[in-house]
Image (spheres, helix red, strand yellow):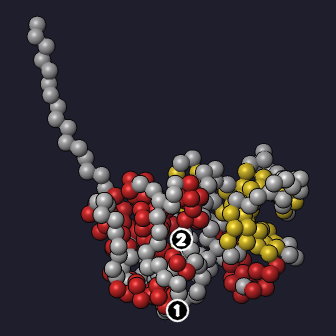
Amino acid sequence: MVESEPCYKQIGKNYYYDVNARPLGAGNFGKVYKGHSLKDNEEKVAIKVISQAILVQYKDYIEIFLREIEVLRKIKGKRLLEFKEVLRSPNNIYIVVAFCNGGSLEAKLDQNGGKLSEAESLKILKQVAEAFNELESLELKNSKGEKLVVMHRDIKPANILFHNGEICLADFGFAKLVDEATKDFKSNNTILGTPIYMPPQILKEEKYSSKCDVWSMGVVFYEMLHGNIPFSAPSDYGRLALMKKSSLDLAEGLRKETKDLITKMLKYEEEERISWKEILTHPALIRKKSTIRIIEVVESS
C-alpha cells in the first residue's frame, strides 16, 4: 500500500496535523489524529475532528457541549486525559487533548488475543477507579457556584489509554455534569454511548445515576479477563433479558475475590451496585502483605 504524501492542516493559531495520516482512532463522533503544538516546541497532541454531518445530526448536543467547555477544561489529574482546547471552523469542531504514547486498551486487547491476565486486568481496573475518584475530588462548579460531578457515560476499551505504562481516562465527549447534591440520585436519561457497554437503565431509557460508569467498566473488566463481553445477544432486548437474570459465566481459574468484584460491578439494580470508592477497598484490589519471618543470625566469635 502506497502511503499518501503528508498534507498538514493548521488548526487555529497553535496546532496542526497531517490530514492524510492514519487516524489514531475513530468513533461515531469523528476521527482522532496525532497533531503538534506550534506554541510548545512541537509538543505532540491528539486532535479529534468532528465533521459538519455530525454537527447537523447532533446539533443540540454539540451546543450543550460547547457551553460546558470551560468546565471540561478543568478536568485534570494523573489518570485523566488533559483537555486543552476546542476550536471550531465552518465545517468541523476540533477537540485538542494531550497525546498518550501507549495506545488504547482496545489495541492492547487486540495484540493479546482479546484478553489479559488477571493481575494486569486488576491493575487497570484499579487505575480506572482511581481516575474516577480523582474526578470526584475536583472542584468543578456550575454558574451558581455549586459543586459538579462528572459522569463519563462512554467507558469502553477505546477510551482507556496508556501513557508511560499508566492508564489515562479519555474522551469526555459524552460526559454529563451533575450537581454534587444529586450525584447519587437518578438523572434524566440521554441515550449516548456504546450499546454493548451500556447499563440496563440507559438501555431501557430509564433514569440513571453516577453508577452507570461502574457498570460499563464492569463489562470492560469481564472482557479483559474472558476475551468476550457478558450478556452477548443480537439485540438490546436480548441483552436486557440476560442482564436481568444476573447470571454471569465466570472463568473457573479466577480468584473468588475477583469473581465477587465483577458480580458487584454488574448488579442489575443500581442500589445494589458497588461504588468507585468501594471498588478501591475491595479485597480483590488489596494485596495481602506477606508475613516475613526475620531470623537473627548470631555469628560465633
In the rendering, at what x and y percent does residue 120 appear?
A: 43, 53
- Mark before the other along the chain sequence, 2 or 1: 2
In the rendering, at what x and y percent does residue 247 appear?
A: 33, 80
In the rendering, at what x and y percent does residue 108 appear?
A: 55, 56
Could one spot residue 123 in this view of the protein?
Answer: no
Q: Along the horizontal axis of the image, is 145 left or right of 122?
A: right
Q: Dot 1 corresponds to which residue?
A: 205
13 above or below 274? above
Q: Residue at x 40, y 85 (%)?
A: 242
Q: Residue at x 84, y 53 (%)?
A: 3
Q: Amino acid at mark 1?
A: Glu
In the rendering, at what x and y percent does residue 92 appear?
A: 82, 73
Foreground of the two, 146 or 83: 83
Real-space CA distance between mark 2 and mark 1, rounded to the nearest whole angstrom: 18 Å
Q: Residue at x 47, y 69 (%)?
A: 228
Asked if marks 2 and 1 touch (Cβ < 8 Å), the reply is no
Foreground of the two, 56 or 146: 56
Q: What quarter of the picture does the N terminus occupy?
A: bottom right
Q: Amino acid at mark 2?
A: Ile
276 above or below 116? below
Q: Along the horizontal axis of the image, is 68 left or right of 109?
A: right
Q: Residues within 10 Å of mark 1 (few under 14, many from 20)?
A: few
Q: Which numbered marker is on residue 155?
A: 2
Q: Quadrant of residue 181?
A: bottom left
